[in-house]
Amino acid sequence: METHLDERFSVPGATATPWEQARDELARAETYWLSTVRADGRPHVTPLIAIWHEGALYFSTGPEEQKARNLETNRQCALTTGASSMSEGLDLVVEGVAAQVSDPGLLQTLADAHVAKYGEEWRYEVRDGAFHHEGGGRALVFEVAPVKVLGFRKGDYAQTRWRF
């Protein structure tokens, strides 16, 4: 991994945000925003929940939802999270390629992680290579391993880029 402080968008004397801090923020965040591209080139952005696990973000979606349809034609995406404050916090943008997950062991690990992070309301059954929610439908699970992450630290403004 390569870390770079972009001095053009940082206060004089700023230091790069440590990757460990960014990684911990990615794991703790409750809400993320997924940006995908529709088949006709228009952007699509939607909030969702996600799990940081072993170096990647994981999210789920119904196969008929717009984000799933977008990922069928273009797997490039970005997940963002952060604070809506101008004076403190760390905003993060994770760029990568979404890959569908079907391994039952990994899916079960992620299902358990959803309950641990978000509560019983987010309990999934794993079967047929997907999540299934009681009373709901099937949800495809996607992994986004970072290719590039941008960190925007507020307060002592610093823009850090990590390349993987």
Image (spheres, rainbow, N blue to C red):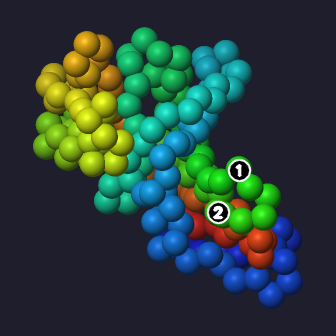
- Residue type, mark 2 in image: Leu
Residue at the spot 85% in from the left edge and 71% down from the top edge: 8
Disc 2 designates what residue?
Answer: 90
Residue at the spot 61% in from the left edge and 34% down from the top edge: 35
As measured in the structure, the alpha-carbon distance from the residue carrying label 1 to the one carrying label 2 is 9 Å
Q: Residues within 10 Å of mark 1 (few under 14, many from 20)?
A: few
Q: Position of residue 19 (x, y in %)?
A: 52, 73
Asked if residue 7 lies left or right of residue 17, the reply is right
User: Quadrant location of residue 98?
Assistant: top left
Q: Position of residue 51 (x, y in %)?
A: 38, 47
**Above or below, comparing residue 155 to residue 115 in the picture:** below
Residue 159 appears anywhere in the view: no
**Above or below, comparing residue 70 to residue 24 in the picture:** above
User: Quadrant location of residue 141?
Assistant: top left
Asked if residue 69 lies left or right of residue 42, the reply is left
Residue 37 appears anywhere in the view: yes
Q: Which mark is residue 84?
A: 1
Assign a secondary structure to mark 1: loop
Furthest toward the front, the residue is 120
Mark nearer the N terminus (1 vs 2) = 1
Residue at the spot 42% in from the left edge and 48% down from the top edge: 57
Residue at the spot 33% in from the left edge and 55% down from the top edge: 53
Q: Nearer the viewer, mark 1 or mark 2?
A: 1
- Residue type, mark 1 in image: Ser
